[in-house]
Image (cartoon, rainbow, N blue to C red):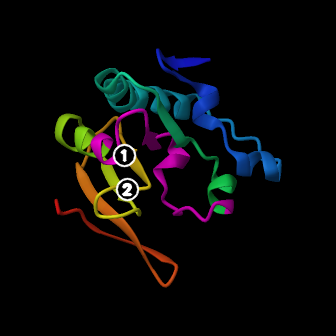
Amino acid sequence: MDITKHLSLAELTYSEKAIELGIINNPTPHQIDNLKLIAQKVFEPAREHFKVPIKVSSGFRISNLNQALKGSTTSQHCGGQALDLQIKKGYTNADLFYFIKDKLDFDQLIWEFGTDKEPDWVHVSYTATKNRKEVLKGFKVNGAVHYKPFKDE
């Protein structure tokens, strides 16, 4: 099932961990509507802007998959409202992060780990209601994940 021109439901639900654990990672119709919304409002505009493939490294997660991945109990991935993205082919994840930050509406945008110049991936969420435009930077201290407000370095 195609969600948008460049994104399928299979890409949004694929998880090696789910396969490994035998978890069926199927969203409800409401969660599919949320996936369509974030795909239309964030993924497709970025894909059209950069004109290169953008990988969804994590999309929808059913709650027991999210728990197995040690995701936040309030993760927007579980509602079909969040994507973890990576871009290649002449662009950086930082390019993707700043494009979303400066040009698109979103609920939450996170520079996930990496360095001050390049995140390992970009987490973005979008809701059908009021989006907060919250921009954070993820980092680890003694293996524990923490977030702080993002500041342009």
Question: Which amino acid type is shown beneath numbered disc 1?
Answer: Asn
- Front-lying residue, 56 or 21: 56
Dot 2 surroundings within 10 Å: few (below 14), some, or many (20 or more)?
many
Please tell me which residue is depicted at 54% across the width and 35% down the height of the picture: 31
Residue 23 spot, x, y in % from top left: 77, 47
Please tell me whether residue 88 is drawn above or below residue 122 in the rendered image: above
The image shows residue 25 at horizontal and vertical percentages of 70, 41
Residue 41 horizontal side relative to residue 66, left or right: left
Furthest residue to the front?
90
Q: Earlier in the sequence, mark 2 or mark 1?
A: 1
Instruction: Determine which residue is flagged by label 1.
Output: 93
Query: In the image, what residue type sits under mark 2?
Result: Pro
Residue at 49 percent of width and 55 percent of height:
75
Q: Position of residue 138 (x, y in %)?
A: 37, 65
Q: CA distance from mark 2 to mark 1?
A: 6 Å
Secondary-structure class at tag 1: helix
Magenta span of residues: 68-96
Q: Residue at x 52, y 79 (%)?
A: 143
Labels 2 & 1 near each other (Cβ < 8 A): yes
Pinpoint residue 122: horizontal percent, then vertical percent.
39, 49
